[in-house]
Image (cartoon, rainbow, N blue to C red):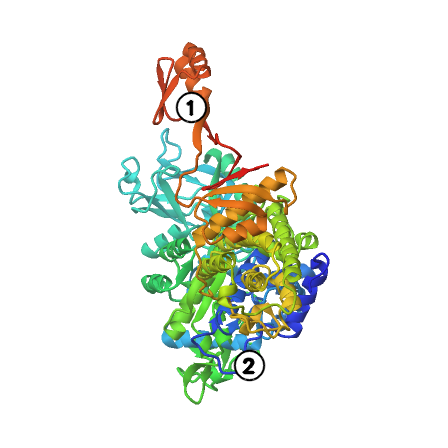
């Protein structure tokens, strides 16, 4: 029996340990699982790069709402957990943690250091997630760098290579100078930065600079450091002022080399001077021009962001420093005509915030641009929660400009299973049976090149992009592998695929969701998910993004020290899925109040209906009020089931709280206090047991504690108690409607009558058992008369189900909107006020005729009051009118 005050500090850690120790949420690996009832969740593996933040707390909790509901509402639920410890993030974490650089170590040595650092963080991360009470199956965890996952990742590479969907090419690629690696389009983001527009005079080659009017033109650029990489100048063919330059050559200031002046419709005549220099490479336009016009290649910036020998005297300087020096020298040479401050959008690497460059390097790609229409169609095959998030996916796919670059020049990652013939360069790919392999230490699968017979091979030393592995999580969890004997791909757990749910944040739709769809679709021919649930971000109280630099970050540890975990779960259910929302402490306090209310109401239920309580009284024993509550609860169960299925957790939370607090506690429970009969005891216990189940996905700990204390060991035969003997509320069946018949409108009116009478006694300082002489009710409460008279001790109750109440609505005043009336009527306002004071006015619909003018709706407001002129006191509750009389 629950006793004393609820102590979440003791209860919550105890259940968290017990759930893990007893493997409460384990997926039944050894037992046959019906693929039609299993519910599988493809959970996002968080990056192992630090401690929990509020986004983790929120995202994990939303996933847990689904897992706990589906576990109760269906069959077995597969809810794994992964750690993304593969790639740049874990590499940078190791570098920061140990104050080292990966370039200073042999790859295997540095990878070992990454494993040690990540293992410590993973252990802490596990403890943090378990402290949230998330119902993960801890027997099904994975790391994106572990051998099993390496095998799946390399199998994916080999399969796509065999399909002809992968290629290696030396071409311009997006490059991060800070991380010193190629990156894909999805890893870049726009950043608003302060810069300068520099107006630079370019002379036309062959013109005489000594002339009074030398032939020159102006180019405006934000990147003067790219001048040594200039290979052409472009003019729009419709540019009347400058098209005479087309066909000439320009001399690049300071550097002196000549470049052609070419016409091209892609020139933006509205930006700068309308004449553009093409540098290899400053942006996507430069790359297109380079390819279309077969221009020269001049690489002025290297992999680390420093100037090359092409930059001549600026060689070795960082690009930013070189840009400033070039501007000074242009000014000194008289070629800098103007320099002005601007703010513009710069493409940066999302990992480190460094402005990206475009370098010509040899990289591996997955072909995607040829199938964007197909990838849009498979995106439409999933259910999107919320539906509006599909537009983000759609915009990303429609905006793709590059195939997926999957090679990285880093130390930590999964190796490409590839060698190259040292003589002819032919690609040799590992055999599927040998995977995983590391070409730096493992031999190729052949002794001689199949193409030319040469016997020396060069191992590929690049590693796969981390998203090339994370995108395979459905296949990893389903046990996708190559069956050598059958010569086909199989799955150890085919019942999991396709997965029922992919939950994730909206910020990684282009990263994780899109790449997962592409990879899994290419490998299996089907979409990997039935549904995707996209959550928003947690903001500060002012709806600003949390940032350590701004100082507005809310740490989960701080929140959990002050509030119960169940209170944070209540808070997490407080907004529509997909919306960004502010962190508000008042929501946590509201959660605490609900927890206390549920605890105290449970104690009251147990005191009013102690064991052994009746499990199934005869139907005729139930009063109308009992039947009404159970019928109302049936309706609530149907509604809540729909809301949980639609992932409308905010509506489910608020509707369940309101029904429990108002209908059950304030109405029925207060009435039941006055009764000592089996029907009330049965109704209390039946409703209470179902409330615990309904609250269980949201308030995981307090419901488990109450269930264990009140029902886990009870051997009952109640209509829904076949599920009542379970040790955990989270493993029992979700409640289904009992099918109780009742006049729900009459019951609602009757409880409203009881409510206003209880309030009447309280305001008049009367005890609840004080007798009321006579009460008249103007509402249809037939069938509930005994409940009203018995609970509220009414001597004479008269019900008027079909009569209008003897109440009239009278006007008690008129309020003017002086903000509109004052300017409009000026000196007449005094006359209007005087007429209103003497009741000299007429109301005609939305118009008020007073003092010779007509005021319209919005210029005035009518104050009204309901009045009763007979004996007794008028009480009202919504549409119910109650008259209380004292006949003494």
In the rendered image, the vertical position of residue 303 relative to residue 411, given as above or below: above
Q: For the residue labelled by badge 2, is the local secondary structure a helix, a strand or a loop? A: loop
Residue appearing at x 53%, y 50% in the figure: 788
Residue appearing at x 57%, y 66% in the figure: 84
- Residue 459 in view in this figure: yes
Residue at numbered disc 1: 860
Residue appearing at x 46%, y 38% in the figure: 197
> Residue 519, how many percent across, how many down?
42, 69
In the rendered image, the vertical position of residue 256 relative to residue 63, given as above or below: above
Which of discs 2 and 1 lies nearer the camera? The answer is 1
Please rate how many residues cluster around mark 1, counting C-alpha atoms within 10 Å: few if below 14, some from 14 to 19, many from 20: some
Q: CA–CA distance between discs 2 and 1?
A: 87 Å
Q: Nearer the viewer, residue 267 or 547?
A: 547
Mark found first going from the N terminus, 2 or 1: 2
Question: Left or right: 852 with respect to 416?
Answer: left
Q: Most extreme residue toward the bottom, as rendered? A: 485
> Residue 888, how many percent across, how many down?
59, 36
Q: For the residue labelled by badge 1, is the local secondary structure a helix, a strand or a loop? A: strand
> Residue 132, how many percent across, how many down?
63, 61
Image-quadrant location for residue 561: bottom right
Q: How many marks can you see? A: 2
Residue at numbered disc 2: 442
Image-quadrant location for residue 401: bottom left
Q: Nearer the viewer, residue 660 or 569?
A: 660
């Amino acid at each position: 029996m629950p006793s004393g005050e609820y102590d979440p500090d003791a209860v919550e850690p105890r259940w968290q340990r017990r759930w893990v120790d007893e493997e409460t949420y384990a997926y039944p690996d050894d037992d046959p699982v019906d693929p039609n009832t299993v519910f599988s969740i493809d959970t996002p593996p968080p990056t192992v790069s630090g401690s929990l933040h509020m986004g983790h707390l929120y995202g994990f909790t939303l996933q847990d709402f689904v897992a706990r509901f589906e576990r109760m509402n269906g069959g077995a639920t597969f809810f794994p957990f992964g750690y993304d410890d593969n790639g740049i993030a874990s590499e940078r974490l190791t570098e920061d943690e140990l104050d080292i650089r990966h370039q200073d170590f042999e790859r295997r040595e540095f990878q070992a250091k990454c494993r040690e650092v990540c293992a410590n963080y993973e252990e802490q991360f596990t403890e943090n997630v378990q402290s949230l009470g998330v119902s993960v199956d801890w027997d099904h965890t994975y790391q994106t760098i572990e051998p099993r996952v390496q095998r799946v990742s390399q199998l994916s590479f080999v399969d796509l290579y065999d399909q002809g969907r992968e290629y290696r090419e030396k071409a311009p690629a997006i490059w991060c100078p800070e991380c010193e690696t190629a990156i894909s389009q999805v890893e870049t983001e726009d950043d608003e930065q302060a810069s300068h527009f520099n107006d630079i005079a370019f002379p036309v080659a062959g013109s005489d600079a000594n002339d009074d009017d030398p032939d020159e033109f102006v180019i405006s650029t934000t990147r003067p450091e790219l001048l040594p990489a200039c290979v052409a100048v472009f003019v729009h063919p419709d540019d009347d002022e400058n098209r005479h330059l087309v066909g000439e050559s320009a001399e690049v200031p300071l550097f002196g080399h000549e470049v052609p002046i070419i016409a091209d419709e892609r020139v933006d005549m509205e930006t700068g001077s309308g004449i553009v220099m093409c540098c290899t490479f400053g942006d996507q336009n430069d790359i297109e021009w380079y390819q279309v016009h077969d221009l020269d290649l001049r690489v002025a910036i290297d992999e680390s962001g420093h100037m090359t020998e092409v930059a001549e005297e600026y060689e070795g300087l960082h690009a930013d420093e070189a840009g400033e020096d070039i501007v000074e020298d242009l000014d000194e040479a008289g070629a800098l005509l103007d320099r002005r401050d601007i703010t513009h959008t710069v493409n940066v690497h999302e990992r480190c915030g460094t402005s990206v460059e475009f370098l010509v390097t040899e990289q591996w790609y997955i072909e995607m641009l040829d199938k964007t229409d197909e990838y849009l169609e498979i995106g439409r095959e999933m259910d999107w929660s919320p539906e509006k998030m599909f537009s983000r996916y759609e915009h990303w796919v429609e905006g793709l400009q590059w195939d997926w670059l999957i090679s990285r020049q880093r130390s930590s990652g999964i190796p490409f299973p590839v060698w190259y013939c040292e003589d002819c360069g032919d690609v040799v790919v590992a055999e599927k049976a040998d995977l995983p392999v590391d070409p730096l230490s493992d031999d190729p699968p052949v002794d001689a090149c199949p193409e030319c017979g040469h016997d020396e091979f060069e191992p590929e030393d690049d590693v796969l992009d981390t998203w090339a592995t994370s995108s395979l999580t459905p296949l990893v969890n389903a046990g996708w592998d190559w069956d050598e004997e059958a010569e086909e791909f199989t799955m150890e757990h085919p019942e999991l695929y396709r997965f029922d749910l992919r939950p994730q944040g909206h910020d990684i739709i282009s990263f994780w969701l899109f790449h997962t769809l592409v990879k899994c679709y290419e490998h299996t021919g089907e979409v990997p998910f039935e549904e995707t649930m996209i959550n928003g971000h947690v903001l500060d109280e002012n709806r600003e993004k949390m940032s350590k630099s701004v100082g507005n970050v809310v740490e989960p540890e701080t929140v959990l020290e002050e509030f119960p975990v169940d209170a944070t779960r209540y808070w997490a259910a407080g907004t529509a899925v997909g919306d960004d929302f502010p962190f508000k402490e008042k929501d946590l306090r509201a959660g605490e109040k609900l927890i206390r209310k549920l605890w105290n109401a449970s104690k009251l239920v147990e005191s009013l209906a102690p064991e052994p309580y009746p499990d199934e009284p005869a139907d005729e024993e139930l009063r109308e009020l009992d039947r009404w509550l159970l019928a109302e609860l049936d309706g609530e169960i149907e509604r809540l089931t729909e809301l949980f299925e639609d992932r409308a957790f905010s509506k489910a939370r608020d509707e369940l709280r309101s029904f429990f607090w108002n209908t059950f506690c304030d109405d029925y429970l207060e009435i039941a206090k006055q009764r000592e009969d089996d029907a009330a005891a049965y109704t209390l216990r039946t409703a209470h047991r179902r409330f615990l189940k309904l609250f269980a996905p949201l308030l995981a700990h307090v419901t488990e504690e109450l269930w264990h204390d009140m029902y886990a060991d009870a051997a009952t035969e109640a209509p829904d108690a076949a599920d009542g003997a379970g040790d955990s509320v989270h493993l029992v069946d979700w409640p289904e409607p009992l099918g109780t018949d009742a006049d729900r409108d009459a019951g609602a009116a009757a409880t409203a009558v009881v409510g206003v009478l209880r309030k009447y006694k309280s305001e008049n300082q009367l005890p609840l058992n004080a007798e009321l002489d006579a009460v008249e009710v103007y509402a249809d409460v037939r069938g509930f008369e005994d409940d009203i008279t018995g609970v509220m001790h009414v001597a004479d109750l008269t019900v008027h189900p079909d009569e209008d109440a003897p109440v009239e609505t009278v006007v008690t005043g008129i309020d003017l909107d002086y903000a509109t009336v004052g300017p409009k009527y000026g000196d007449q306002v005094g006359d209007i006020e005087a007429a209103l004071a003497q009741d000299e006015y007429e109301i005609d619909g939305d118009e008020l005729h007073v003092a010779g003018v007509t005021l319209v709706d919005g210029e005035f407001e009518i104050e009204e009051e309901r009045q009763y002129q007979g004996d007794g006191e008028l009480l009202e509750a919504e549409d119910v009118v109650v008259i209380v009389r004292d006949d003494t």
